Amino acid sequence: MTQISKFFRHCIFGAYLGQLEIRIIRNYFLIIVLFSFFLATPALALDIFLFPAQPELSNDSLVVSFGLDTGADKINAVSGELSYDVSKLELVTTSNANSFISLWLEAPNTKTAGSVSFSGIAPGGFAGQGKIISLIFKSKTGEHEALNFVHIKNVEILKNDGTGSPIATKIISPSASLISSLDVSSASDNSAPELFKPILSKNDPLLGNQSYLIFSTTDKGSGVDKYFVAETKSRLNIHNAESLSAAMWQEAESPYLLQDQSLSSYVYVKAVDRAGNALVVELDQGKNIYQFWWFWVIIIVALIGVCLWLKRKFF
């Protein structure tokens, strides 16, 4: 009888220990979960903002710039839209001066009245505080504060993580020190736009599968203002002003449909910034020798010479 009592006491005590052990494990698990929750770093939104910038090259212009602070994140693409009140402001131009975006998929444009849309990439990624674009206005009412009439819309920023995952954003009011670090005056711009390479393509049904040019560059001073294209039968010296002035330049936008679809001409693209500095580059067409006019002149002259020689020799 005593042994049976002992047996039951051991069973009851063992069951109690088992329950106690389960409680300890459960409480320990809850403590770990709560501890991890409080230590976890919350996902913060990336800061985006507008700020009034210094007038670019003209004292009567009003400049509003769009910038961001990536914090601990690294990004590689930005797209968005900025709207403005057309009753208060007249958009003169846009500027990519001092922008960290070096490749524009959609250069800042005004397809819709009162709105500027854009899309660009920072190859290799970008981290830190940076300016994206500037809008340059003239006041219609004589007011000198444009910031109240410009707004951020539909901004999407992609992370440089290999998948291009979107990052949440929040609009902030930047500090004076942040504005000062990003607002670099371009009034003394003496540098030409950045070197670039035009691309020749013809795989676009919208352009009738005809040959066209794609080109884009940036300017760290006052921003790119215009592009020009020249197609010539004789080669130009891109480092000689007299040679360049002899060409017939056409103001152009990318993509640009070539006039000479035979591709027998030399093609040049000129980028001009808002300070008047220019850079001219030549399209590398990889031409075959028979595409040059002088090749056929040589062939014709050679054939005439051979015919004259044969006539004298045998007739």
Image (cartoon, grey):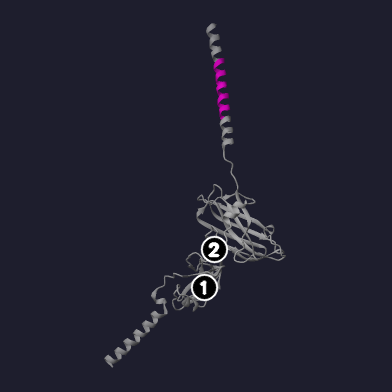
**Which quarter of the rendering shows the N terminus?**
top right
Q: Which mark is residue 221?
A: 2
Instruction: Label 2, secondary structure: give it.
Output: loop
Residue identified by numbered label 1 = 229
What stretch of residues is rendered in magenta?
12-29
Instruction: Name the main secondary structure of what is drawn in magenta.
Output: helix
Left or right: 311 in relation to 267: left
How many circles with numbers are drawn on the protein? 2
Residue at the spot x=56%, y=24% of the render? 24
Quarter holding residue 108: bottom right
**x and y percentages locating residue 91 in the rendered image:** 65, 65
Q: Residues within 10 Å of mark 2 (few under 14, many from 20)?
A: many
Q: Would residue 17 be counted in the magenta stretch?
A: yes
The amino acid sitting under disc 1 is Val
From this view, report whether residue 139 is shown above or below residue 288.
above
Q: Residues within 10 Å of mark 1 (few under 14, many from 20)?
A: many
Q: Which mark is residue 73?
A: none
**x and y percentages locating residue 81 in the rendered image:** 63, 58
The amino acid sitting under disc 2 is Gly
In this rendering, the label closer to the viewer, 1 or 2: 2
From this view, report whether residue 129 is shown above or below residue 33.
below
**x and y percentages locating residue 145 in the rendered image:** 69, 60
Residue positioned most to the left? 313
**x and y percentages locating residue 189 in the rendered image:** 54, 65
Question: Foreground: 280 or 186?
Answer: 186
